[in-house]
Image (tube, rainbow, N blue to C red):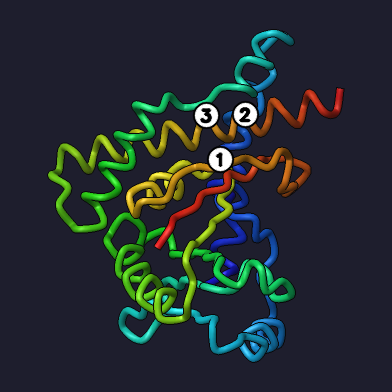
Amino acid sequence: MFEAVAAERIHSAIDKAWTADEERAYIESLSDREVIHVAVQQGRIVGLQVCDRWSSLLPSMAHVGQIGTFLLPDYRRSGLGKRLWTATQDFARGAGYRKIVIQVRASNHAAQAYYRSLGFNECGRLSQQVIVDGFADDEVLMELFL
Amino acid sequence: MSSTNLLDELLDPVSECFDEASAQRLADFRIAPSLQNRMAELAAQANEGLLSPEEQDQYEALINAADLIAILQLKVRKQRLAS
């Protein structure tokens, strides 16, 4: 799935798909306060949403989680993102998070609209935070209090 | 040829049409809050599968136009950094 996301070049900060070993290592590193929800259609993963800690080191930020959402192009704007968020939001509340933060590429207006539709508000901007193929893009910071 | 390469072929010459002041204005361009709110409204309806065909067309048109502007912005910024 990440190969398709990375190939788009403008929507995500992911510019190179992870290997199976890298994905396995990441999944195994998740704590019980972190989760990956997947959307499956006809036996194929077509989308996923990751929820993990904003900081794994600072107890003062233990109440802050961050998410990332990835959907294959043909499955966007179909309601799957909302269904993933419903599951993630329930998990996040149960895991003790009080707010969720998302970083989304400034060029990805569809994703910003998606997060705004969920109640996220823009709260900052990181200039030239992503460089893909030599193109520097900002990242928009958005937050939602649970 | 991939769609990305085709878009590059189409937009690279366009991105070179701007003088310095215009390029800066394009690089700094932000979508108006009212339009951002409209896109979020349409996204919320899409989340629930409630978009009418007309709204679906409007949403797709807005997203496609915003993507096009974003690609041009990235290209212009890259040229400005290189110059």
Judge whether B38 appears above or below A85 on screen: above
Residue B25, located in which quarter of the rendered image? top right
Task: Mark 2 and mark 3 in contact? Answer it, CB < 8 Å.
Answer: yes
Mark 1 burial class by Cα count in 10 Å: few <14, some 14-19, many 20+:
many
Query: Measured from the top left, where is residue A7 in percent x and y?
Result: 60, 58
Please give the name of the residue rendered at 44% of the width and 45% of the height, measured from the top-left corner.
A121
Identify the residue under disc 3: B69
Residue B12, located in which quarter of the rendered image? top right
- CA separation in Å, label 1 and label 2: 9 Å
Query: Measured from the top left, where is residue A132 in percent x and y?
Result: 72, 49
**Residue in the foreground of this view, choosing between B8 and B59:** B59
Mark 2 burial class by Cα count in 10 Å: few <14, some 14-19, many 20+:
many
Identify the residue under disc 2: B73
Nearest-to-viewer mark from 3 and 1 = 1
**Residue in the foreground of this view, choosing between A23 and A101:** A101
Disc 2: host chain: B
Please give the name of the residue rendered at 66% of the width and 83% of the height, measured from the top-left corner.
A26
Disc 3: host chain: B
Task: Mark 1 and mark 2 in contact? Answer it, CB < 8 Å.
Answer: yes
Query: Mark 2 is on which residue type?
Result: Gln
Identify the residue under disc 1: A107
Residue A130 lies left or right of residue A113; in this view the side is right
